[in-house]
Image: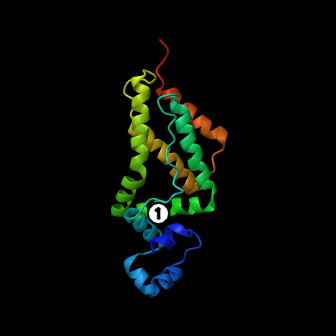
Amino acid sequence: MRRAVTGEGYEPLTIERLAADAGVSKQTIYRWWPNKAAILGEALVEGAPPAHLPLPHDTGDTAPDLAADLLAWLAESTRQLQRAEGLGVARALIAVTAADPEIGAALNERLAAPIREWVQRRIDRAAARGELRDGVDAILIADHLIAITAYAALTGTVHSEERLRGIVAHLMHGIVAPPE
């Protein structure tokens, strides 16, 4: 069933199709899951994350640019949401997270934790170079970035490149160390 949920597309997927592929009745599917979002959530908790989830970009230590890295991740997240499949999957994940706290916590750990860890590493490196104000909370920043993409999915908003640049500029304005 996982193949059908994450490999062939979420929007066209139906409970009828899942039941037929599994060789069971629709009632059997509904006995275990209330809807296809719950099936997707469980499939993502138990299997590999879908290939289309945007991974954070890192310019590395040779050309460190925190703002460019954050902008690249937001831009890729936006591109994924622009695809109907990305928007459908994102909305389904939000729905199942709200409806099932246990699955929601597991999805958060599986899908959001790597983003938080990446932001933490990037913030730590920028802080070590003296680029940031003291006390910048990397996890709070990561949660804000994730929330921006989740809100965009909920509202169907597609942020322009200009808007994304503005978001990153505003964030950087708040965390960059003032010149001495």
Above or below, comparing residue 1 to residue 91 in the picture: below
Q: Position of residue 17 (x, y in %)?
A: 53, 81
Q: Residue at x 42, y 81 (%)?
A: 29
Say which quarter of the image contains residue 118: top left
Given residues 1 and 102, the one toward you in this image is 1
Q: Position of residue 88 (x, y in %)?
A: 56, 63
Q: Number of marks in the image?
A: 1
- Residue 136 placement, left or right of 10: left
Q: Residue at x 59, y 49 (%)?
A: 78
Given residues 96 and 115, the one toward you in this image is 115
- Residue 18 placement, left or right of 113: right
Given residues 99 and 161, the one toward you in this image is 161
Q: Residue at x 45, y 75 (%)?
A: 1
Q: Tell which residue pokes out farthest to the front in this image.
A: 62
Above or below, comparing residue 106 to residue 119 in the picture: below
Q: Residue at x 48, y 47 (%)?
A: 146
The residue that disc 1 covers is: 95
Q: Position of residue 39 (x, y in %)?
A: 44, 71
Q: Position of residue 30 (x, y in %)?
A: 42, 80
Above or below, comparing residue 79 to residue 140 in the picture: below
Color style of the picture: rainbow
Q: Tell which residue pokes out farthest to the top in this image.
A: 180
Q: Residues within 10 Å of mark 1 (few under 14, many from 20)?
A: some
Element at label 1: helix
Q: Amino acid at mark 1?
A: Ala
